[in-house]
Amino acid sequence: MSKAKYTITAALPYANGPLHLGHVAGVYLPADIFVRFLRMNDHDVVFICGSDEHGAAITLRAKKEGITPQEIVDKYNAQIGKSFRDFDISFDIFHRTSSPIHHETAQAFFKKLYDNGKFTEDTSEHYYDEEYNQFLADRYITGECPKCSNPSAYGDQCEKCGSDLSPTELINPKSTLSGKSPVLKTTSHWYLPMDRHEDWLREWIKEGKLDGVQQHDPKAWRNQVIGQCMSWIDGGLHPRAMTRDLDWGVKVPLPNSDGKVLYVWLDAPIGYISATKQWALDHNKNWEDYWTGDRKLVHFIGKDNIVFHAIIFPILLKDHGGLILPDNVPAYEFLNLEGDKFSTSRNWAVWLHEYMEAYPDKSDELKYVLTSIAPESKDSEFTWKEFQTRINSELADILGNFVNRALVLTQKYYEGSVPEKNELTDEDKRVLEEMSAIPDRISKLVYAYKLRDAQAEAMNLARLGNKYLAETEPWKLVKTDPERVKTIMNIALQITANLSIILQPFLPATAKKLSDFLNFTSSDWTKAGRDNLLNAGEKINSPTILFQKIEDELVENEVAKLKSSNPVESKFEPQKEAINFDDFTKMDIRLGTILTAEKVEKADKLLKLTVNTGVDIRTVVSGIAEHYSPEEVVGKTVSILMNLAPRKIRGIESQGMILMAENEEGKLSFMIPEKGFEAGGTIR
């Protein structure tokens, strides 16, 4: 029976910053383990990744640092690539979406869909920054979330409540470029009519069938992947723009489309294909062999990318025609850090490149810990204390202790020669039987994408060996029954040789050390479980310590480093970007007295207020209805931003903004002045 062929992708890291351990644990390490296992089992497999180098976030980073987008992506592509190499992630290719072959591939993909009528063209109003003379991508716009009143929501998502948004839903939107209120201006875009695809997507995701033909096993998909996809589909899919008004990205390959580029979530996943093309050219292969026919396409991603890989990209692949759809999308939940979320803005992170610089000989230790706590089905947490505990009590005290005993005693008793195996006791047979069963259990778990449990099974072989030596005590028995000790030590060495095979996907550097100790090398998974990997009389080498124990000082230093980079432990949002004094003086903030208040129809969070500002009477719509009733606010003197451009909210023109204080639980409070201040007073 022929073995399944695989095309494995790992989410393209965004080239606007370094990698942290959350990225590693939830995408790249599990993908690497899976691929290493497939290679050992003689599958035809290609492992694809590269940096995602387009989109609004990169142009924002470039503006912030005062350099070009190309300089940004060159910098972080190099840094991320080096981090992967140092950490020994075994990509077949780590490519980039700014490459010419990617631009050609993405444009050809778009053009084929366009020519086949898979897009619709629509003219609509989008926000435009008049000072910068450009349309604003979703991430160039911030404002108040209409659902949770977060004042810093983005135009595509509120990161506080997690709601998906469109820019026009934001209350009091601001351009992140100029800081001013944008205007609506008409522009045209090409849309992917996702609503046309609901029926086949539902059958494909829930039942694994496409046009009635079984494509994949839906039981192998993670519940959170199917649940999130079905929530989107059952809620009704909507057309999604596949182009953007930007000057950085893959140009739209159509006439009269100057200033338009491909949407990053059309552009980026095609990067998997263009990277495969480059790899195929470099190795005299045919790229189509890896994207067509009887082949399994597997996307390793984080949960925030589920919809793009399990709904949008499959639609694009199907519309293109002739390309395989994903066999599985093993999405991971989030990894937290020392009781808090990873945060790049607050530098609350353990950066992979910094870890590798500080501990270049401890890559396997980190791999082991991250796989042990992998957020496969729910969020998990990395702490330096657990890092220490797992290395000391598991890697050092179990695996390291067993290997050291087995090899040191062999050197001591037999001058480094493998002893003969004599008659087996029932205990020996039980140990060997258990050893032979472990590789198959690991295989079943890996194929089911349960890599955390698979690593635990591999460690169970070390536990088995450690327990075997502890119970048989060859160091005591050698004086009274030396022939029995030969058998015990032979079995211990066979276990060690097996460890050198089954640890390769999980701890490749450690497996290589074991191979060097034993003068035995095999990457053939089918040999794992055998009790004759080493022959009597073969020489082994003296071992070195596999794992140095982690001292308290390392833990204390790393935790202190984290806290020093984020000195105030706060649940509040970090400070926004600095503004100059002139920007501040442009704001006209005064005291006002609320004269009347009423709820806005069909809007649970909005109150319509009539406010005496001391210079006029004006209407303000405020999102405070969940915190105050109309009766509670009448007569209060409040702070009001006067010169905010008027904006219609639910059909009511709002002529300013009431300023509120917010606590860590999201509760709002008026900022009420001391007695003796009246409407019209200026706040400086």
Image (tube, rainbow, N blue to C red):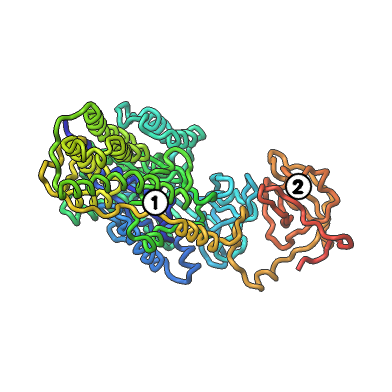
Q: Is residue 374 left or right of residue 288?
A: right
Q: Is residue 446 visible?
A: no
Residue sitting farthest toward the front? 480
Residue occupying image coordinates x 21% and y 40%: 478
Residue at image coords 47%, 56%: 552
The front one of 392 and 585 is: 392
> In the picture shown, does residue 593 fall above or below 495?
below
Q: Foreground residue, 227 or 398? A: 398
- Helix, strand or loop at label 1? It is helix
Left/right of residue 241 with respect to residue 204 in the rendered view: right
Q: Report x, y in % for residue 539.
A: 13, 49
Q: Is residue 176 left or right of residue 70?
A: right
Residue denoted by label 2: 608
Q: CA distance from mark 1 to mark 2?
A: 48 Å
Q: Give x and y (percent) for residue 151.
A: 63, 54
On the question of residue 660 being in view, the answer is yes
The 10 Å Cα crowd at callout 2, few under 14, some 14 to 19, many 20 or more, is many
What residue do we see at 45% from left, 55% from top? 244
Marker disc for residue 24: 1
Give x and y (percent) for residue 276: 25, 51
